[in-house]
Image: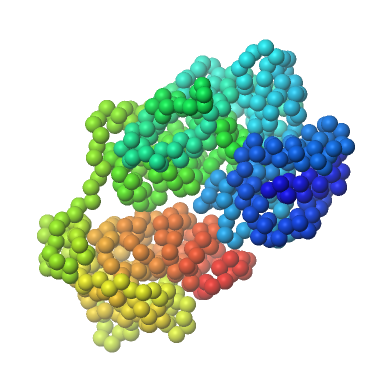
Amino acid sequence: MFEIFDCVGQAVMNKGVRGLCDFVPGSSYLLDVVGEAYRLIRDRRKAAQLREDIARIAMASTEEAKKIAEEVARKVAAKAKPNEQIALELYLTQIPGAVRASLKRSDDPSGKTVPPDFAVNSSEDLGKLLPQRVPHFRPGAELPGRPGWHLAELLGAGGFGEVWLARHTFIPALRAVKFCTDPLVRTKLTSHEGKVIARVMGQGTHPNVVPLLDAVLDGETPWLMYEYVGGGCLTDLIHRWQKLASAEREEFVIAALHQLATAVGTFHRLAPPIVHRDLKPANILFAKEEGGRRKEESLQLRITDFGIGGVAVDYLRTNTSAGLSMLSMMTGCLETSLRGSYTPLYASPQQRAGNPPDPRDDVHALGVMGFQMLTGRLSEAPGIDAAEDLQDGGVSAGLIALITKCVANKPDRRPKDATDLAEKLTELKGNAKTAPIPKPVIETKPAGTAPSSVKGGQDISVSQNKAEIKPTSPTPNSSVPVKSGQEARAPHNIPTPTPNEGGKVALSPATPVILPSSKWFIPLRAMWFTRSASDADAPWSLHNAKLPGEVTAKGGEIYRLALNPDTTSDAELAKLRSLSGLPGLEAIDLSGCTQVTDAGLMHLAQLRGLKAVGLSETQVTDSGVTLLLTRFPELEAVGLSGVENVSQTVIPYLTRLRKLKVLALPPRADTVDVRVEFTKRRPNCKLM
């Protein structure tokens, strides 16, 4: 870690530290520094060592970064002027934040881990990991327009602003001052957003809101002054709560959500309402107590950045490159919307689409945070199987229902505002603890004995030791006719890695687990294909079963279900729930099912162990496909040919399927560039 700081510091000195002080955006100075730093690093460190260094830097705290930056600055800039030494120190201190910003991705939004395929192979790669500029201000500088206040320490830097800790000559309380240095932001702050900020300040104080105490919105560098909260953020609590028993954790989560919803609801009930628009764990703070300890029961959460969420959202929506390169040296308590706002993980579909602010956008964000508090999955938003995930964690039925309503895609299904949500949480707090939703289990006959009939709308599926009761739909009277001598075919949207298989999916060989035979009722019109689990190259065989109807699942076999394009709809796919425990069902083909949308795709989440899925010519979109890929990371074959509503947005999700062997690209993503780049990342995957 020290070697990287030292090489960068030496590069700055070799190219002239004065250039860092007089840095002009767009100049070649930074490129020269990066090129020199890369040369020095490659002379000192091997690729494996460099990777380890970057991993340590990504995990470094602010104090660690400051200590090393001071040491390097003293060493390489000993003969430089004091202001030049300070500039170098400030620049180096930002390196961990820059590294984390570069490493952020969907499976690690914190950027604190290095992905498996990470490498620094060029100066361009290194440039992505380094700060893009030195801060605008210096420690000790006077706060513009407020004599007596001085800037003490840089807390964070972002694409359009900086956050500083400020001290007064005789006022003991510390303040956090956020400067807006981007010209477009300055214009917005002095117009519409300035009026919103004035309204926020006019509301006085709320115990769960970090108060906006002062603001200067004119001049060269507009700023906002907040109370400084130095304890930590909600992220820290979420990690802590995962060590608790589920009942105790749920109690804390309900209390925390109630605090937040009550505070946000205060602003939602104004006329017109004020919407935060950037609620996320990093914007939920709590203060330190005497001695640095605080009891969980007495935690007072504080929401920051009321009044400027709209600035951040618009900035990042219209400045994608800047948003992707936002930097910060903050790792703990004061991560603000000036460093990384409009986080897609928490934004509602309407907010991502650019619709006007709506209180239900904040409700959606609170629902996402509630899910994360309960599961500890900070890199995930609630997916299509969110209710099942919460149920597995022992969460009560009432809270599961409320969380899933908060994150509904349609805003009219969510609580109307945060006050409404707070009232519903009050009911949960007042009720006796609701027992977690049980998974219905009944004692069965010895393993291998299957039920011979279905009664009362329930299907009793047998495993080795127990049976689960699953609802089924009434048996339709029609079936799919199979012509005599018809060749067993695999639908075209589930391709195969072997050319002699005629488009059928080849699944990787594995040692089969031999399970007893069991009978299953398939409640949809479809074709049933089988093959041996021990031979991935074997062709699929079309079974002569007439569906809807009964099939026998045998040990050592795997199955593919090809749905009838004429009758399969979103409503029909709901019947897949009854097949959630069917052993060996590894492939689902919806080829040509033009009535299937994202809503129908959600029902596939009820299945287990899918390895191949075909969606050719369906009406699914990016949203549905990305959720499906997240739900089934072990997919080996995906067919998206003819899916007009899917774009290149899904490509990063597909590249993360490490077992993917066969892929049929959607038309809007089927370009030469995509194929070349995808082949580089997944050379063992065959593109159809």
Q: Is residue 630 above or below residue 510?
A: above
Taking depth in this image into account, of 60 and 193 the one nearest to the observer is 60
Q: On the picture, is 609 further left or further right than 109?
A: left
* Visible residue check, residue 498: yes
Q: On the picture, is 424 further left or further right than 203?
A: left
Q: How is the image coloured?
A: rainbow
Taking depth in this image into account, of 76 and 95 the one nearest to the observer is 76
Label tally: 0
Taking depth in this image into account, of 89 and 644 the one nearest to the observer is 89
Residue found at x 28% / y 67%: 583
**Where on the picture, by quarter, is residue 537?**
bottom left
Residue found at x 61% / y 68%: 680
Q: Position of residue 625 (x, y in %)?
A: 44, 58
Which residue is the extreme one toward the bottom? 485
Q: Position of residue 649 (x, y in %)?
A: 53, 56
Taking depth in this image into account, of 83 and 345 the one nearest to the observer is 83
Q: On the picture, is 519 further left or further right than 513?
A: left
* Visible residue check, residue 350: no
Residue found at x 48% / y 68%: 660
Q: Position of residue 53 (x, y in %)?
A: 66, 52
Q: Position of residue 12 (x, y in %)?
A: 82, 45
